[in-house]
Image: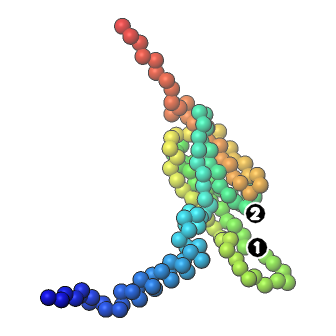
């Protein structure tokens, strides 16, 4: 007995696979499925790290001044960064590509521990904003010595 594989979509399945492959190639070309690109879809991209005494938040903000930013620490563990990136003005020229976003932005996030909001500082140097958030004394880890009887 001869069996034939049943294909309800006939030739549509290979065509669908070809279309999917072309779409993936197009998305790669425009940077939509690049993990580095998707991380930049939230502006500004942030790095958060810590040492024994402080938390540090770093954000890439080229062409901004500290006066263009508002930085808040609410509840001692909520960080808010707001600002506006102005559209560059070009006289006597024509834009061919404009991939750097402009307009108002806002980032709000919870910090991993409480900070002393009265001692927070911010510095903008070479387009990188660095926010130093001193840890509150009661939230710093401390070693507990175990005593034996």
* Residue located 46% across and 17% down the image: 145
Q: Which residue is mark 1?
A: 88
User: Residue 92 location in percent, x, y?
Assistant: 85, 84
Query: From this viewpoint, which residue is outermost toward the left?
Result: 1
Query: From this viewpoint, which residue is outermost toward the right?
Result: 92
Say the numbered circle drawn on residue 63: 2
- Relative height, residue 80 to residue 118 (above, below): below
Element under label 2?
loop
Say the numbered circle drawn on residue 64: none
Mark 1 → mark 2, Cα distance in angstroms: 10 Å
Q: Is 134 or 3 nearer to us in this picture?
A: 3
* Residue located 68% across and 58% down the image: 60
* Residue located 68% across and 49% down the image: 130
**Image quarter hosting the C terminus:** top left
Q: Which of the 4 quarters of the picture holds residue 137?
A: top right
Element under label 1?
loop
Q: Is 6 or 74 nearer to us in this picture?
A: 6
**Image quarter hosting the N terminus:** bottom left
- Relative height, residue 4 to residue 65 (above, below): below
User: Residue 79 location in percent, x, y?
Assistant: 56, 50
The answer to whether 137 appears left or right of 17 in the picture is: right
- For residue 118, say whether it is visible: no
The answer to whether 47 appears left or right of 94 in the picture is: left
- Relative height, residue 135 to residue 28 (above, below): above
Query: From this viewpoint, which residue is outermost toward the top?
Result: 149
Around disc 2, counting alpha carbons within 10 Å, would you say few (fewer than 14), some (14 to 19), or many (20 or more)? few
User: Residue 81 location in percent, x, y?
Assistant: 61, 56
The answer to whether 4 appears left or right of 121 in the picture is: left
Query: Which label's residue is closer to the chain start, 1 or 2?
Result: 2
Determine whether label 1 and label 2 are within 8 Å by CB.
yes
């Amino acid at each position: 007995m001869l069996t034939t594989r049943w294909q309800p979509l006939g030739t549509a399945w290979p065509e669908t696979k070809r279309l999917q492959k072309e779409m993936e190639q197009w998305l790669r070309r425009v940077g939509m499925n690049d993990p580095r690109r998707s991380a930049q879809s939230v502006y500004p991209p942030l790095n958060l790290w810590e040492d024994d005494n402080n938390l540090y938040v770093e954000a890439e903000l080229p062409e901004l001044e500290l006066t263009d930013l508002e930085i808040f620490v609410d509840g001692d563990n909520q960080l808010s960064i707001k600002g506006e990136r102005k559209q560059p003005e070009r006289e006597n020229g024509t834009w061919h590509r404009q991939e750097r976003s402009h307009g108002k932005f806002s980032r709000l996030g919870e910090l991993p521990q409480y900070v002393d909001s009265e001692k927070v500082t911010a510095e903008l140097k070479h387009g990188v904003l660095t926010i130093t958030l001193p840890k509150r004394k009661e939230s710093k880890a401390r070693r507990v010595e175990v005593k034996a009887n």
